[in-house]
Amino acid sequence: MLLQRNKLGSVRPPKRCRSDMDTTSTSDIVIINGNSHPDLANMVAERMGLKNGGCSVFHKSNRETIVEISDSVRGKDIYIIQTGTKDANNNIMELLIMAYACKTSSARSIVGVIPYLPYSKQCKMRKRGCIVSKLLAKMMCTSGLTHIITMDLHQKEIQGFFDIPVDNLRASPFLLQYIQESIPDYRNSVIVARNPGVAKKANSYAERLRLGLAVIHGEQKEAESDEVDGRYSPPPTRNSTPQHAPSSSRTRTTSVSVGVPEHPIKVKPPLTIVGDVSGKIAIMVDDLIDDVQAFVAAAEMLKDNGACKVYVLATHGLLSSDAPHQLDESLIDEIVVTNTIPHEIQKLQCHKIKTIDISILIAEAIRRIHNKESMSYLFRNVTLED
């Protein structure tokens, strides 16, 4: 290196051009994982040219979770890859303990890579329950996580439960590419929403593919088993109004003399299809496939209305219980899910299940976060309906 002298005779290094600036190296990245999806963690690490960090997670005889990290994490950026499976409670405890172990070992940052966030469907208050997603978010923030990377949350508003940044990635580009490349004559298809709640997502797919849209309306009413626990007990009624009550003509307020009005019973109509599916390929889209009875019933209705083939595309394939057997015996021709959740055993039980690898998206998100680059490229052309 040539050295230059200034007027005072001191030696100063030459100016460095922009191409000579040091870039963020990957030597301070550590990728560890629990027992939920080691294959996905290995694929992400391989795409980034890294080796999986030395972390072992095991359970004692009393089912307590033990985490041992063999490599040093002091001052490093830790990325914990842990998704939700059918063993959701153990997955959560492993994640929390791994994050807390890294926090107490002086890690610089701890990013939780959770492709499928457990309990994401319990994000609303229902009867006398609670919002479990809110509780889970507080636990993750307390454990030491500084950032969350997830994919296709059941509701986007779940991001507001966290006090740390949350990047909600989208798997729709992979699923759209599959439709265009792997479904023969996809131009003769129609995007189907299994219920009105999925209509926005289905409409987004239909607009991107320039296809028609159909919505299945009407569902079987769930059994009300809580009619005797006090929820439906009416308030006491009064046969007479107070003597000093102001008249309605003077206050212009309508009064009801029988107490609190009763809510009308909501009766859902029988299953009907809004849209034309006759002679077309029906493609149902959703974010999660777990209990498949609704998908099987929808496929039967689509076939009865003239659909030639039925595809089901979703981001997360939980497929718990006997879902693979039900799908294998159903009228659904193909089920396409990503590898956010391991389902190798389910694929052995049902030959209709196809898998799309999304490890490249997770690896790119990790690289951009570590290099402090913009994440907007991964969200391009994403609208509010996604």
Image (spheres, helix red, strand yellow):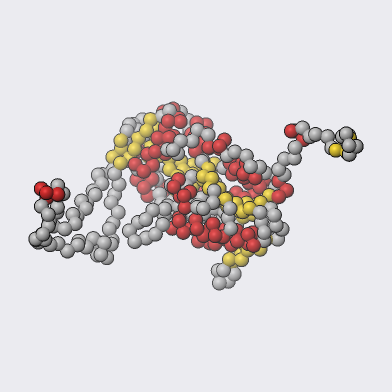
* Residue 282 in which image quadrant: top left
Question: Seen from this angle, which residue lies furthest front?
Answer: 8
Nearer to me, 193 or 71: 71
Tell me, yes or no, if residue 360 can be seen here. no
Nearer to me, 169 or 334: 169
* Residue 366 in which image quadrant: top right
The image quadrant where one finds the C terminus is top left
Residue 186 at x, y percent in the picture: 45, 30
Residue 151 at x, y percent in the picture: 51, 45
Q: Residue at x 37, y 56 (%)?
A: 125
Task: Note whether 184 is above or below 343 in the view shown.
Answer: above
> In the drawing, does residue 298 fall left or right of residue 347?
left
Residue 374 at x, y percent in the picture: 59, 38
> In the drawing, does residue 270 fall left or right of residue 199?
left
Q: Residue at x 54, y 62 (%)?
A: 93
Nearer to me, 298 or 156: 156
Q: Report the label total.
A: 0
Q: Residue at x 10, y 59 (%)?
A: 244
Residue 69 at x, y percent in the picture: 67, 61
The image quadrant where one finds the N terminus is top right
Task: Note whether 296 is above or below 178 in the view shown.
Answer: below
* Residue 134 in which image quadrant: bottom left
> In the drawing, does residue 196 fall left or right of residue 63?
left
Q: Residue at x 37, y 60 (%)?
A: 129
Question: Seen from this angle, which residue lies furthest bottom?
Answer: 62
Nearer to me, 355 or 300: 355
